[in-house]
Amino acid sequence: MVLRLSLGENSYDIIIERGCLKKAGEYLKLDRKVLIVTDDGVPAQYAQAVASFCKYPHIVTLPQGEQTKNFNSYIHLCKEMLENNFTRTDCVVAVGGGVMGDLAGFAAATFMRGIDFYNIPTTLLSQVDSSVGGKTGIDVGEVKNIVGAFKQPRRVLIDPDLLSTLPQRQISNGLAESVKMALTCDEDLFNFIEKGVNEENLEEIIIKSIIIKKNVVERDEKESSLRRVLNFGHTVGHGIETAMFPALLHGECVALGMLPMCSDEVRARLINVLCALDLPVTASFDTEKVLQAICHDKKLAGSDINVVYVQSVGTFEFRKMSADDFERQLREVL
Ligand code: GLY
């Protein structure tokens, strides 16, 4: 299946096909210098498969994990390209999860003011969400994604076969983002997930999630309005992620973060779905620390917080919540 994301001259194809990694030479323009960025948690043969199609491949393997998404890794990638005389007509390929996609994409966005970027996501989370839409960036200290750029890839290759080596916890982690998209934008997808997720219907969930993401990004690429819906669960989720680091994965924090931001009726259905997917519905954390992380250590009192709220499945509202209501909701629900 090929989905076309239409953004004028930045339009691109998203290929969703079992085995497409092995056809990377057909789908990507690799007869040039290619920086392949991967991490040591990704099977090395994935990056090697891409390299086998390249005229001049340079594989960089970084340590797995969010800590790698930093300025030092970014400089490392830039130096690698500089030392190997990359020009504006060369390219970067990310082979990994969201961390590799964000980091490699940011290097591609900024090296020589922008060179071609391809994304080959290898985790479910990156296949259903982060590989599409052009958000790239790095963390600074504990603040996630605070430096970055919008850089649309030239093409995205989603190979569901790559998920066969993923631990079940990583599958659940990715499904949290699909639940987020279903709950806010697609009641049918939520009903579908509610009936049960298995190996057979996972590809369908990937496709349905990407269609939602694509429709949102086409209407609001730079997140001036509508795209904020994709942050549902993320305000609280990011706070929990920082406060609990490294105990919980991103999707697990998003799962928790959605719970205070919906009506009681929606929350009851959401809890059932999250439990069925082995995602957390409670966690013991220091609420003060979470609130501090949410506001980057500034005082929340007196300010309003922009949130995405789900009153009924498949719909969303942008709401402003007072800091007091926000804190109360957090303490009551989690
Ligand atoms: N993952 C949220 C977005 O791409 O906007």
Image: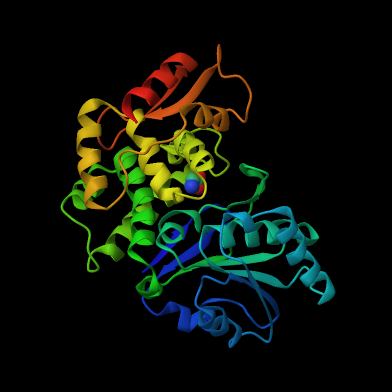
**Number of marks:** 0
Kindly give the residue lying farthest to the left in the view shown.
195
Please identify the quadrant where the N terminus is shown: bottom left
Nearest the camera: 218 or 298? 298
What is the x, y in percent for residue 297? 63, 28
Which residue corresponds to the image point at 28% horizontal and 43% vertical from the top-left? 186
Query: 94 or 244, which is in the foreground?
Result: 244
242 over 92 or under it: above or below: above
Q: Horizontal and vertical percent for residue 249?
A: 44, 51
User: Is residue 226 shown to the viewer in this render?
Assistant: yes
**Relative to 34, is 273 above or below?**
above
Is residue 218 visible in this depiction of the protein?
A: no
Name the image quarter holding residue 268.
top left
Q: In which quadrant is the C terminus drawn?
A: top left
Residue 99 drawn at (x, y percent): 56, 58
Q: Is residue 102 left or right of residue 310?
A: right
Q: Position of residue 15 (x, y in %)?
A: 43, 69
Question: In the displayed structure, does residue 219 sit left or right of residue 295?
Answer: left
Q: Residue at x 52, y 58 (%)?
A: 98
- The colour scheme used here is rainbow
Question: Going 68% across and 44% down the picture, which residue do you hit?
Answer: 141
Question: What residue is drawn where x is 64% and y is 58%?
Answer: 68
Q: In the rendered image, which quarter is residue 330 located in?
A: top left
In the depicted view, which residue is nearer to us: 38 or 131? 38
